[in-house]
Image (spheres, helix red, strand yellow):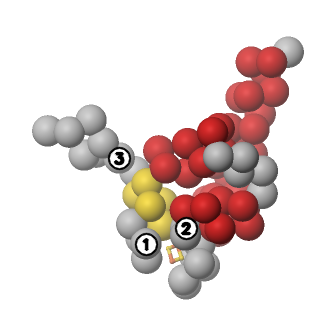
Amino acid sequence: MSYYSEENIICNCLDISEHEIVFCVKHQDGKTVKDITKRTGAGSSCGSCLAELEEILVRETDKMKKTKA
Ligand code: FES
């Protein structure tokens, strides 16, 4: 069983996991939902995952701010 086998899929259209989105926010300069869509493809089809992308973005950005403080 791989480490990511139970990964939460956020974007069902493109099969993009929460891990990939978090990675994008942390390491690929994903500062907006548009950035995340551009880099991972998540949110570029039906758009129903956009709210979740925003939630993850806000959560991870907050975490990074707290870590830096
Ligand atoms: S679920 Fe992400 S674009 Fe459809």
Tell me residue 61's x, y (percent). Answer: 75, 38
Tell me residue 65's x, y (percent). Answer: 81, 27
Q: Is residue 49 visible?
A: no
For marks 2 and 3, give the one nearer the viewer: 2
- Which of pointers 2 and 3 lies earlier in the amino acid sequence? 3
Q: Amino acid at mark 1?
A: Leu
Q: Secondary structure at mark 1?
A: loop
Instruction: Tell me the residue that label 2 is attached to.
Output: 42
Instruction: Tell me the residue that label 3 is attached to.
Output: 7
Picture residue at 77% right of the left edge, 33% below the top = 62
Question: Above or below — where is 30 with respect to 35?
Answer: above
35 relative to 23 in the view: left or right: right
Most extreme residue toward the right is 69
- Which of pointers 1 and 2 lies earlier in the amino acid sequence? 1
Say how many tags the image has: 3
Q: Amino acid at mark 2?
A: Ala
Q: Amino acid at mark 3?
A: Glu
Instruction: Tell me the residue that label 1 is attached to.
Output: 14
Question: Above or below — where is 39 with respect to 69?
Answer: below
Q: Is mark 1 within 8 Å of ligand 1?
A: yes
Q: Secondary structure at mark 2?
A: loop
Q: Quadrant of the C terminus?
A: top right
Question: Above or below — where is 27 with respect to 13?
Answer: above
In the image, 34 versus 53, the foreground residue is: 34
In the image, 28 versus 14, the foreground residue is: 28
34 relative to 4 in the view: left or right: right
Picture residue at 71% right of the left edge, 51% below the top = 30
